[in-house]
Amino acid sequence: MATPRATIPLKYQPQRYYCTDTVNSDCQKGFISATGLNHHYNAVHKHHTTRPSHPQQHSWQPTGQHDGSGDDNVEPQGAYYVKHPPGTPVDLNGDDLPEGASPPKPNTPSKRAWHPFESRAHFELADFIFHQNEMPGAQIDELMHIWASMPGQAGTPPYANHEHLYSTIDAISEGDAPWTSFSMESVEAGGSGGPSWKHSVFGEKGQCVWSDLMTGNWAWNQCNELSKGPDNHGAMFVPIILGSDKTTVSVATGNNEYYPLYISAGNVHNGMRCAHGEAVSLLGFLSIPKTDKEFEADPEFHTFQRHLFHTSLEAIFHAMHPAMTKPQSVKCADGHYHRAIYGLGPYIADYPEQALLACIVQGWCPKCTAHQTHLDHDPNAILCNHEYTQLLMDSFASYVLWQKYGIVDDILPFIASFPHANIHELIAPDILHQIIKGTFKDHLVSWVETYLKKHYKNDFAAVLADIDRHGFKQWTGNDSKALMKVPNEMLQALSAFMDFCYIVCQSSLGEADLEALDKALQHFETHHSIFEAEGIHSDGISIPQIHALQHYHEAIELFGAPNGLSTPIVESKHIHAEMAQVLLVNQWQDKLAQFQAECLAEGRELTIDNLSLLNSLFSGLLDKPLIPQDNVHEDTSFQDDPYLQEAEDDDSERVDAVVQLAHKPSEMGQDIGHPELPDLVSIFLFQQRNPGVDVPDISKCPKAIDPGYSFSSAVATFYAPSDFSGANGMHRQCIHASPSWRKGAPCYDCVFVEKDPTLPGFQGLYVAQVLLFFSFHYQNVHYPCALVQWFTPVGNELCINTGMWKVGHEYDEYGDHLVSVIHLDSILQPAHLIGIYGDEYIPPDLHYSDSLAAFGSFYVNKYSDHHAFGLAF
């Protein structure tokens, strides 16, 4: 007989408690109970205690050549930063303000709070419907009809219809930037003849550290150049980051090509830009000329396309040209007006667009003069600039420029018309298309597959099926068995490339990291010759995406960490809709975001004094005061925060790692599958209360008599600046210890456990598999714990071929798996183990959940995430 469900309260429960976290003041999520607020605070905003840092993977020894700050003879100790001056505060006329003066108030007519919205609730409803939920207009109309028919609404909904909502958003004055357009045509167009297209920081020991764009040498060089103008003194430099990405979107009318152009301020932190927030804006759409099929390969048509692209960009930024030589007054986040001088900065684009931007022939390098046939080994290669290009154009015929120098004649990049700008320098490194896709997926994976096909011949299909039962189209962690079937030198090339990739993806890089980057690139270039020797790429490796790796060292010194200038940042802004909708949606979303920021800056936020604003729509919504965070009582069995996922970003401040038990405990019964647990708990208690003392006879160890509670998972929060990280680079993952995960197979995850924080890398760590999460009290002390099964290192050093450590199961004197109880604080984060494969095929019925039992030894995967790469070296 089915168990009846608990009675569900049918009465509406308003959100009475709102987040007031001081660090993330713009959160302000609402909850119906104090326990829900407390759960949200602990999961999202809790300010964790930082554990001692492990030694860095790439240590750096100073050479004595760094001046640092202060006395040149004193070597700086610890990390320090040299900041760009923020600019002198000015009044509305651009004149300097006295030191300590308050920001001037703009000369705008007074208006009621939350104008043009009737109240804060009207604004939040508009933001929820339009920005967060992206509700279609027809559904907005239906919602308003239902709302009006509700008893007590007197037939008046908050908005009459979707047009009323849209017009209210459009009336926001903050962030208003109307769209404009312009037309162009070929200067040769005339009459009816011819083709139709003619008519249409410094770190430890004083080492330099590069992170955000403003930490790079390029920004400093620009400031030095601008400082030569006496009118620029006291101004701040604002780089303009650009990005474009031609894309095809599918809508009801078919496939439509769009060419969006994006813009971002260069003095925004990389974390804000990578968090896919409002730091990147849609600037416009570039024209895509069309022609009949007979003219698609016409060189004259291609010339027109190039000229149209560069002329359009030059026209778009023509209005900003005066602001690149003379400072303009602009309101900043501190409320003050500052003099700002702008400059064109890095341009984010994939390789075909880089070639278009640099006006070079496809297959050549957009940054240097290396010859197409031997990009990586051209001793005469130098960095390009516009003056050098113009000199070649004045000296050689078009066909010589094309064949010998890879230069497209009769056109200079649009950026040559702007001050202090060189497109060959400003082309940003592209992690996605140059490293992950351009080098790894499109070439290395393809070459490995070619090798397997060549050497296994008749058995190739079986080998490929054994590697990946779902088809070898994308190489994931489950396909690592392919690495066991290739020569060791090929493994070493792949390992060196992976090291290069993970170093580049760091959010900040010091001089030691750049030395390690150069070393990894050198090893990769040495060992990837195996693909030439095996006849896979026998004509030599001269590929622009792979050659681009040679420019990363210099690009990092110029522009900071590459992960702040990658193409996914602009690709994330693509909206699948008609162009007219795209224009309005982006404009209105910018307005809503700017309006919210202005409201927060002016103090229009949820406080006890203005909670009555919300009552304009809902009577009795907040009939209790907003309680401070310290007075929230915790009920760990309650959860009403829908935002927690298996793995997600975290907006809390940066810490190395912290692990917390889940918030839904179950009382531990007698049958938990581990009869030895009581004795292990006694040993654990003795060790906790007597650190460093040998464990005596079990009978002399303390016994825990209070009931314990088991948990199916714990949440690890650690620093891993990836696509799923918050603005501070924090990431959350669940660690499972469940006999049935999602009503399926069991899931018992592996973790890194701290052994000695003073030892470098994996030497200071253990690896264990979690069998059970539980907690109990002993003498009024709370102990969150884990029952773990241990692994032991195989050998005393990294595998020379894969660059990873090996581990195997650890056994006690009776031949059983060694298990023990550890404190939750000793767990750093999840660990990923890769089985070390033999020559035999994997049984087709082997389930992935049995992999830790099926293999005798494993690689410790240091490439599972950014934090693991910094731990397991």
Image (tube, rainbow, N blue to C red):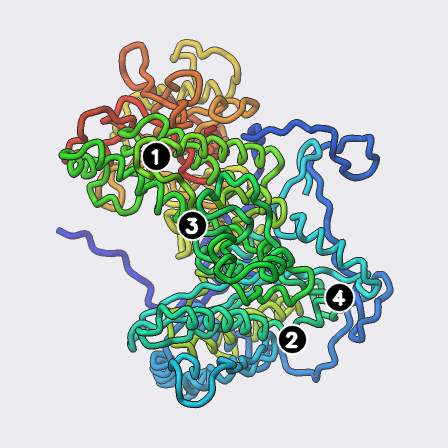
Q: Residue at x 16, y 52 (%)?
A: 2
Q: Residues within 10 Å of mark 1 (few under 14, many from 20)?
A: many
- Please tell me which residue lies in front, 177 or 310: 310
Q: Residue at x 35, y 19 (%)?
A: 679
> Circle 1 sits in a helix, a strand or a loop, which is it?
helix
Apparent side of residue 774 relative to residue 627 in the rendered image (left or right): left
Give the quadrant of residue 387.
bottom right
First along the sequence among labels 1 and 3: 1
* Contact? badges 2 and 1 (CB < 8 Å): no
Apparent side of residue 14 relative to residue 205 in the rendered image (left or right): left
First along the sequence among labels 2 and 1: 2
Residue depth check, mark 2 versus mark 3: number of the one nearer the observer: 2
Which label number is shown at residue 531?
1
- Please tell me which residue lies in front, 395 or 769: 395
* Contact? badges 1 and 4 (CB < 8 Å): no
First along the sequence among labels 3 and 4: 4
Which label number is shown at residue 319?
2
Which label number is shown at residue 648?
3
* Amino acid under disc 3: Glu
Work out how far the residue at label 1 is from the one at label 4, CA to CA, in angstroms: 56 Å
Apparent side of residue 92 relative to residue 19 in the rendered image (left or right): right
Residue depth check, mark 2 versus mark 1: number of the one nearer the observer: 1
Work out how far the residue at label 2 is from the one at label 1, CA to CA, in angstroms: 51 Å
> Circle 2 sits in a helix, a strand or a loop, which is it?
helix
- Please tell me which residue lies in front, 526 or 209: 526
Q: Residues within 10 Å of mark 3 (few under 14, many from 20)?
A: some
Work out how far the residue at label 4 is from the one at label 2, CA to CA, in angstroms: 20 Å
Q: Residue at x 31, y 16 (%)?
A: 811
Which label number is shown at residue 338?
4
Residue depth check, mark 1 versus mark 4: number of the one nearer the observer: 1
First along the sequence among labels 4 and 2: 2
Work out how far the residue at label 2 is from the one at label 3, CA to CA, in angstroms: 41 Å
